[in-house]
């Protein structure tokens, strides 16, 4: 096949020295090499995201450059920030900018609360409607179903995936109990 294209049968050619211009004593294996540029350029690779779509189950940013997703911040990146003592940046990337969530926790039994709204009086709402003022959404009062009280409720910031984990464990009949640093000692029915 090489001979049909004008090359030596063995793939060797006689070359001339670039310094002296004389013919070299030996034949050297030579042939054309065809290659193309790989698309590993910065303009093809860069990815930026400030806000965008999130996963509906975990409430974390979706993945993939094509979908406008976030860049994965994995365990090695986390370990690098820990080694450099950048705890504020670590908290910002893994909590505040990812799946920040505010949950209500009962400080007596340590359970995550689901909104059980205790209805307030509707007279204030009716009075505002009569005056033509916009009605204000009533403030939610949470009650713990286990303790049967609305006292001792604490608001805690946590990643939403922690609440998802609590729901997964509850489906397997495992109760997750949170211990808060400012936990009340006794429930109101047992205290003074």
Image: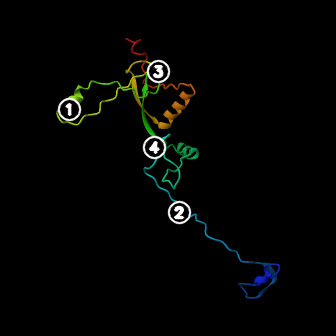
Instruction: Please tell me which of labels 1 and 2 falls first in the chain.
Output: 2
Residue 28 relative to residue 192: left or right: right
Residue 101, placed above or below residue 62: above
Q: Secondary structure at mark 4?
A: helix
Crowdedness near tag 3: few (<14), some (14–19) or many (≥20) residues, C-alpha within 10 Å? some
Q: Which residue is mark 3?
A: 109
Residue 146, x across and y down, in percent: 45, 19
Kindly state the secondary structure of the residue where label 2 is placed.
helix
Q: Which residue is mark 1?
A: 128
Q: CA distance from mark 2 to mark 4?
A: 28 Å
Classify residue 150 as left or right of residue 95: left
| Vertical comparison of 11 with 148: above or below | below
Residue 86 percent across, percent down from the top left: 49, 44
Q: Secondary structure at mark 3?
A: loop
Which tag, 4 or 1, sits closer to the chain's start?
Answer: 4
Number of the front mark, 1 or 3: 1
- Tell me the residue that label 2 is attached to: 44
Q: Disc 4 designates what residue?
A: 92
Q: CA distance from mark 1 to mark 3?
A: 38 Å
Secondary element type, mark 1: helix
């Amino acid at each position: 096949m090489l001979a049909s294209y004008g090359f030596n049968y063995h793939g060797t050619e006689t070359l001339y020295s670039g310094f002296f211009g004389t013919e070299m004593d030996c034949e050297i294996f030579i042939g054309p090499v065809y290659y193309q540029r790989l698309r590993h350029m910065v303009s093809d690779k860069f990815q930026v995201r400030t806000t965008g779509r999130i996963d509906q189950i975990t409430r974390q940013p979706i993945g993939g450059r094509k979908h406008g997703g976030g860049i994965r911040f994995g365990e090695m990146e986390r370990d690098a920030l820990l080694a450099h003592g950048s705890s504020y940046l670590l908290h910002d990337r893994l909590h505040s900018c990812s799946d920040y969530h505010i949950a209500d926790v009962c400080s007596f039994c340590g359970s995550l609360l689901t909104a059980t709204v205790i209805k307030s009086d509707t007279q204030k709402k009716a009075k505002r409607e009569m005056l033509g003022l916009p009605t204000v959404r009533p403030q939610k009062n949470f009650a713990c179903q286990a303790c049967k009280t609305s006292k001792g409720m604490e608001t805690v910031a946590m990643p939403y995936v922690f609440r998802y984990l609590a729901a997964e464990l509850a489906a397997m009949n495992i109760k997750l109990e949170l211990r808060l640093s400012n936990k009340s000692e006794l429930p109101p029915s047992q205290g003074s």
